[in-house]
Image (cartoon, rainbow, N blue to C red):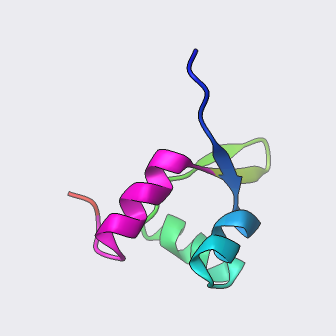
Amino acid sequence: MSEFKLYTIEEVSEILKVTPRTIYNFIKLHNLKAVKIGKYWRVTDKALQEFISRGTNKPE
């Protein structure tokens, strides 16, 4: 299995310079792909890169 990076909500909020609540809203609105593992949300590096390149426009 190839290695991949998973980010916490807090890490993503620091990278994007927004609040964790904003990240939760992006996830809820399906602007940012995330997976819930246990009770915690995680964002893959690929999903974060796609979000950054697309912005807040919804995925196709």
Instruction: Residue at 75% x, 68% y: name it.
Output: 10
Residue 60 seen anywhere in this rendered image of the structure? yes
Outermost residue on the left side: it is: 60
- Is 4 above or below relative to 9? above
Outermost residue on the right side: it is: 39
Percent of width and height locating residue 32: 46, 62
**Position of residue 49 in the picture relative to residue 16 (left or right):** left
Q: Nearer the viewer, residue 40 or 5?
A: 5
Magenta residues span: 43-58
Instruction: Residue at 70% x, 77% y: name it.
Output: 20
- Is 38 above or below relative to 25? above
The quadrant of the image that shows the N terminus is top right
The verdict on residue 49 being magenta is: yes
The quadrant of the image that shows the C terminus is bottom left
Percent of width and height locating residue 17: 62, 83
**Position of residue 45 in the picture relative to residue 9 (left or right):** left
The verdict on residue 37 being magenta is: no
Instruction: Residue at 62% x, 85% y: name it.
Output: 18
